[in-house]
Amino acid sequence: AKATPRPAAAEEAAEQVLCVSAFLWLPLARAEPIRYSVAEEAESGSVVGELAEDAGLTPAQLSARRARLVSEDGRQHFRLERASGRLVVAGRLDREELCAQSATCMLPFELLLSNPLQFFRVEVTLEDINDHSPVFPEDQVTFDILEKSDPGSHFPLEAAQDLDIGSNTVQEYSISPENYYFRVSYGSRITGKKYLELVLEKPMDREEQAEMSFSLIAVDGGSPPRRGTTEVKIVILDVNDNAPIFTQDEYIGQVSENMPEGSVVLTVQATDPDAGINGDISYQLSQAVGKSDSAFVIDNKTGEIKITKPLDYEAAHMHELSVRARDGGGLSAICKVLVEVVDVNDNAPELVVSSFSSPLPENTVPGTVVALFTVRDRDSGANGKITCDQLFFSLRPAYKNYYELVTVSALDREETPQYVLRVTAADAGSPPLTSTHTFTVDISDVNDNAPVFNQTSYTMYVRENNVGTVFVGAVSAADADVGLNAKVSYSLAPEQGPERARCSCISVNSENGHVFVLRPLDYEHLRQSEVTVSASDAGSPPLRANVTVRLVVLDENDNAPLVLYPAQESSPASSELVPVSAEAGYLISKVVAVDADSGQNAWLSYHLLRATDPGLFSVGLQSGEVRLRRPVTERDSVKQKLLVLVRDNGQPPLSATAALSALLLKDFSDVRLPHASPPTEDQDASLTTYLILALVFVSLLFLISTAVLLARKVCRRKELKAGHVLYAADTLQSGLADAAAAGTLPAPTCYEISLTTGSGNSEFRFLKPILPSLPPQHCTVGQGLDEEQDFPAVPVSTEDMAPDSAGTLSAGQFNALSFN
C-alpha cells in the first residue's frame, strides 16, 4: 500500500482556509483526501499505510487527541494503531462482496480527532486478486443437431462468468477431449457484446453415432489461472432445418423498484418457420452466476417475463437475463434481456453522528462545536439530494455531507436545563422524504439556587400524653439545581435572642425533613410551640432557606372535673336550709365544677346519683342547679342527703361527685348548730356579747372594703369587667381564688340580708372577698382516682339570687352560691 503524495498547492490552500476559519473553533478538513491501495483478502493486521505521517501528525498526538476512524456505512474495515500511527486491515476484505462487478472499488472513511475537533478524508482502493474461478450458468448443455447440418453451423452457448475483473476474468475456452466434429469460437462483436459458440467442423451421421459428449473449459488470466467446466451433450437428430429466431437480439425493459410481485416486465418473442412440432417454441430463462434466487420468471409458452419479488434499486441497478427459445426439433436460439430498475424515493436520508458533546457547562462560550455528523441518502439523482434544517442552534457545513452543530448564545441551566435539538435532513424526491435526529444537550449546573420550601409555614398537630419520638409531619424543600447542588438537608435553626429559646422536645430528620416530638407533652402546660427549620444544599458554598414550624398540642381527656362548690373538704359539712313551704322548682343550691381540659372534654353535665328521697330533688343537666321537684310534705325527712355526679364529655368520660345536705325547716329559728347542746343563760349572754363584737368588726370591715372597691372601680373597670367574683360562704375552696385571680369570673354581686327575730343561736355567714394572692388548691376527684390535678382559671359567672317578698334572703339562699 502506498500513500498518494499531497500537492503543495492543496496544502497551501488548506493552511489559508485554516487561518481564516480559526474563530470557528474547528479546523476544516484537508482539501485532498489521503489515498491508499490494498489487495483484497489481505490478512488482518496487514499494513495499509503510515496514516499519522501522511496526516502530519505524531503517534503521541493520535493518543492525546483520541483519534478514531469513522465510516459512512458504520463498518470498520481498517484499524488505526495509535502507538505507531499505521493504518492496518481490521478484517477480511472481499472486493466482490463490497463492490460487486464495479471496475474500481474504493472504501472511504474519515480520521477524526478531538481537542480541537479535526478530521481527514481517507480513501483506500481495494485491488482485485484472482480468487474466483469461471462458472458456467449450467453444468450440462444439450444440443439436438440434425444430421444434415452443414459444416460451419454455429450453435450459441452461454459464456462462463467470472466475478473477478480485468485480466482475472475469462480469457479463453477449449474442448476436452479433443473433438473432430466441433470447435469453440469466442470473442467480442463490433458492438462490444461477447459471444461463445460451437462451430460444426464436418458433417455428422446419426447412423454412425447417435450422440456424443465432451467438456467445455473456460480459463481466466490469473496467476495461477483458474478454470471452469461444463458438459456438452450432442444429440444427433433427423432434419429440422430452421432454428428459432428472436425478433430482437437484445431486449431492454424498465421496472420501478416498488412494482408489486407478478408484474410483467416485458415479453420476448421468437419465430420458427418450421411446421408442426419443429415450429413449437418454448422459452427458458437463466440468470447470471451467483443469482440462484432469481427475481424473475418466464412463461415458457408466451415469453412473458414477470418479477417474483419486489426489486431494490439500492441492491442492484441492472439485471441481466438470458432467454433460450427452443423448437420441438431441438433447435434453439438465445437472446439477452436487460432489466433496468428505476429508482423511486423510498429511502429517507440517514444521519450518522461522528462526535457529540453533552453535557455542556453553563459558561460555554458561543460558537462551541456540540456535534459533528454526516448525512447520506441511498437513493440516486434528485431522490438522494439532501438538505438539512435545525432549530435553536446553528448548523454549519464542514466538508461534503459533514455538518457542525454549534452554540450561538450563552447558556443558562436555570432557564433551560436541557436543549432538545431536532436536525431534519430532507431529500429532493417527490414527495420528499425526511429523516430527523434528536440531539439532547444537557447543561451542567452551578450552585446558584437556594432551597425553596413548598409552604411558607407549617402547622403540625400532636395529642398530649404522646409517646416519645412520635412523627407529627414533614417539611419539604426543593432546589432548582441538580446533583449535589440540589441535595437538601434539614436542621433546626438557632433562635435569635434569649426570649425565643428553642423547644428541646422537637427534632427534624436531616435527610427527609420528618418532624418528631421527642417526649410526652401536656396540653395544660404547653399548648403550642414554634421552631425554625433550615434547609441547606450540598453546594460549595452551601445555600440555605428557613421556614417556621408551629406545633399545636391537642387536648386529651386526662383531667377529671373539679368540684368548687359545695366544698368537699369542709368538716362539718354545711347544710342548705329549705323552708317546708317552698314550691316545686325552688332553688336549693348549685353545684359548681370546672375541668382543666378544653373543648368537649370540658363540657360538664350534672346527674343526681343518690338522695335520701330521690323523688324530692332534681339537678339541672347543664347548670348543676339543685331544685325541688315537688312541694315538701310532712312525711319527708327533715335532713336530706344528696350525691351529685359531675361528668365531662370526653372519651372515655371522667367524673367527680359532690355531696351536700339540706334541712327542711318550718322556720329558720329552728336552726341549730350540729352537735350543739342547748345554751345556758350565761352562754346566751356570752354569745350575745360575741355576736355584737362580731357585727361591729364585720361592719367596719365591710365599709372599708366597699370604700376601697369603689375607689379602684374607676381605675380598674376593664379588670372588674373581666370578672373578679366575690363569693359568699366561709367553706369556699381556695382553689376558686386562682380562677378569680386569672380574671375569668364576672363582676361581683352583693346581696342585702335581714334576719328574723328570735334566732336561737344567732348564727351568721358573711361574704368574704377572694384574694388573688391565694395559692392554688388541689382536689382529688374522679372515679376512684387518687391523682392530684392542677386546674387553671376557668370562666364562671354569678347568677342573681331572687329575694323573697319581704326583700330578704332566706337562710338557704344566703348559704347557696349560684353561678350562671
Image: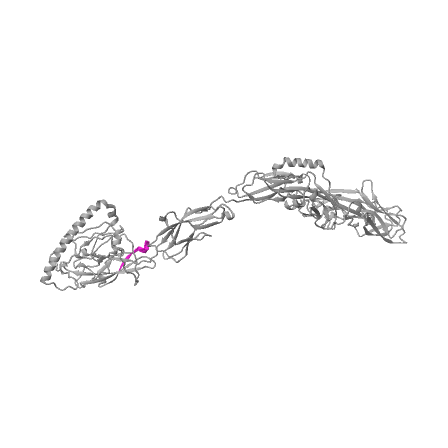
Q: Which quadrant is home to the N terminus?
A: top right
Percent across and percent down for residue 698 are 15, 53
Q: Is residue 755 visible?
A: no
Q: Is residue 520 left or right of residue 442?
A: left
Percent across and percent down for residue 569 are 24, 61
Q: Residue 605 in magenta?
A: yes
Q: Going by the picture, which residue comes out furthest to the left?
A: 681
Q: Is residue 122 left or right of residue 600?
A: right
Percent across and percent down for residue 276 are 82, 48
Q: Is residue 782 visible?
A: yes
State the image quarter where residue 562 is shown.
Answer: bottom left
Query: Total of numbered circles in the picture?
Result: 0
Q: Which residues are magenta?
A: 595-607
Percent across and percent down for residue 212 are 86, 53
Instruction: Identify the residue at image location x=41%, y=57%.
Output: 469
Colouring style: one colour
Of 335 and 387, the residue lying toward us: 387
Q: Residue 245 in magenta?
A: no
Of 140 and 592, the residue lying toward us: 592
